[in-house]
Image (tube, rainbow, N blue to C red):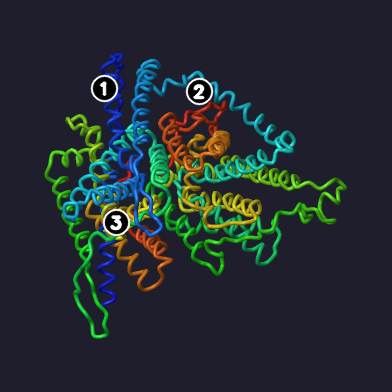
Amino acid sequence: MTAPTTNPAKPATSIPALLKTAFVNALIALVLFSLMIGIRTEAGSSGQLTYWTRFGDLASIVAAVFGGSIVIELLRQWIGPTGAEKLVPPAVQSGISFIGRYLAPALLIFTLLVPVIFYNQRYILDLAILVLTYVMLGWGLNVVVGLAGLLDLGYVAFYAVGAYSYGLLATNFGWSFWICLPLAGILAAFWGVLLGFPVLRLRGDYLAIVTLAFGEIIRLVIINWQDLTGGPNGVSGIPRPSFFGIPLDNSDDGLAARLGIEYSPTHRIVFLFYLILALALLTNWATIRLRRLPIGRAWEALREDEVACRALGINTTTTKLTAFATGAMFGGFAGAFFATRQGFISPESFTFQESALVLAIVVLGGMGSQLGVALSALAMIGGFELFRSLEGYRMLVFGMAMVLIMIWRPRGLIGHRAPTVYLTKAKAISSDLVKEGHG
Amino acid sequence: MDYFAQQLINGLVLGSIYGLIAIGYTMVYGIVGMINFAHGDVFMIGGFIALITFLLLISTGLTAVPVILLIVLLVSMAITALYGWTIERIAYRPLRHSFRLAPMLSAIGMSFVLTNYSQVAQGARVKPIPPVITGGYTLHESADGFVIQLSNIQIIVVITTIVLLAIFTWLVSRTRLGRDMRACEQDQTMAALLGVDVDRTISMTFVIGAALAAVAGLMYLLYYGLVDFFMGFVAGIKAFTAAVLGGIGSLPGAMLGGLAIGLIETLWSAYFSVEYKDVAAFSILIVVLIFMPTGLLGRPEVEKV
């Protein structure tokens, strides 16, 4: 289907041509932004719309586009006609995946030591917990998208099911976190199977839209079923996790008092950190193990070719359902953790934006690559934090980054990965050889 | 019965707007084979540009409503079409031969960019305009006083949709561009070999889709009297649902799907509950797809081995 893209070496552009391109780009920018930036509207107190002009902003944006297109064009000539692909030479790429083998254990050791190194820096610990939550979600979704090749745009629904299961069971019945955690996983897996049934016959983009619709249905039901879920107000007063029954607080019963050390609120943060790390590692371990079992191989076979898979006698129904259920279960665990960490959940945390974020983490990391998912979660969530001060522009920058990274590396950061089965020696395979997301 | 008739009218009007957006999804899917996730946001941008043009025209003292409407229509179609063109160049053309998930993610990224761009540029609050087109007709008055009304704006929305659909069907079936589009839909490589400028055809597809979305944005603005930066997401999913429901890739299917979604949503709100109208629309999508995996008018998917 794909037409070959020939990229003939362009002759170096002359200065008038350069200026002409920049001028055309500036003109396009002028038309695009003329009304949206040049005129600002606002509804007054009586509901009447007023407007004022911002021609200064418009002029600076157009000027920036003019200058920017000259700079980009010059850079393109300097780097070479093929542009982006040559930015990272193959030697460096294979070097990265070679380092990858040692990077993973090093990263794990560093992660284990994070609470020791940054003991008194609450902000860094909170951020680390957030990153690990997304690593876990990414690894969970990786089972569905990366291994089984089923494109799921509603993954956050299972996160929501897990969070609400724990939140409601804990606040209504007072059950402990350690009873609710497996229950949250089971309930989420149940919903995964429920979603799995209608989509058994669907492929590709139809699958994508149904999962998206499913995610929205769950969110809308949570918003509107006020009696059960509290609607837009959410569930508050969700109990904090205990250290296997021993509360982590200031009381005489608390862990600090029992151990005879001075109480510090950081203890709970550190505990939460190791809790999510353990959950994430459990996800990782289970995924790696499952890949080697018949079921995991069936997932990968399904991803590569559904017709061949059926011809070989693999039951695609159970294969798809188990993939959805497994991915959903990990999402449910992460949701329960999220609920206990926040102490408050509301439908606002479970929007499509979250699903897209997790999917972006999986795809940008290089699908199927456990290390890649972890690194991209770190880069995305950490990078996201850098723009915290620019509240309004945060998602704008994030969206642009998504577009640019996809253009730069459509196969994700880690383009190579270890094969699941091999005869004598494991060779890294390029992800170009792997089919993904066909459903 | 009268109540039902009134809801039927409302549903068809809403469905026309969804149908106009759905055509953009269906065209891009038919030719490039990918979901244009940013299309709902293009609709939102179209609504904003229409709103600002209105404001500027009214402040110049122009009072002739048909003239205002015509200028707003042309300006918002032109600028939004340029948005469609630019989006294709930036986010989709470099990824056309990439693996499937890449253009989908860049489209999602583009959708975030557009949503937040309008939030930054125009603020997060809802922007209302005073009603431009007022009045209407009373079709029927029953004994107990219930009136079936057909407002002028409803007539305008439906007529605009029918006219655009006619123009567009003519464009696809009779013109050179339409023939190129159908050729690209069949096989891009073969079309290129036979002298079709594939890049240009795909660009034009985005341009036309965006222009139709701009019309939908204007109709939405006239009908509901407001725009806000987040309306693209919800309307976008609904329209996409409509396109899938009708059988993605099929133009009459997109219109039919749009009308179906509009009717389902309106009738559900009228007889059951307003809160669950979106749940109903999405559930019916799932149910239809279980029994007809390629939508109402979709062609069966051929499995290439």
Question: In which quadrant is the N terminus of chain A drawn?
Answer: top left
* Marks 2, 1 in one chain: yes
Q: CA distance from mark 3 to mark 1?
A: 39 Å
Which of the marked residues, 2 or 1, is nearer the chain's N terminus?
1
The chain holding disc 1 is: A
Residue picked out by circle 3: B220
The secondary structure type at the circle numbered 2 is: helix
Could you tell whether A195 is left or right of B243 in the image?
Answer: right
Q: The residue under label 1 is which amino acid type?
A: Lys
Q: Is residue B250 visible?
A: no
Residue at the image point whose x is 43% and y is 50% from the top: B124
Q: Is B183 situated above or below B258?
A: above
> In this view of the protein, which residue sits in the foreground, B76 or B269?
B76
> In this view of the protein, which residue sits in the foreground, B63 or B70?
B63
- Kindly check if marks 3 and 2 are in contact, taking CB atoms under 8 A apart as contact: no
Q: Is residue B232 visible?
A: yes
Could you tell whether A309 is left or right of A261 in the image?
Answer: left
- Kindly check if marks 2 and 1 are in contact, taking CB atoms under 8 A apart as contact: no
Could you tell whether A45 is left or right of B294 in the image?
Answer: right
The secondary structure type at the circle numbered 3 is: helix
> In this view of the protein, which residue sits in the foreground, B268 or B244?
B268
Label 3 crowd bin: few (<14), some (14–19), many (20+), radius 10 Å: many
In percent of width and height, residue A74 lies at 36, 18
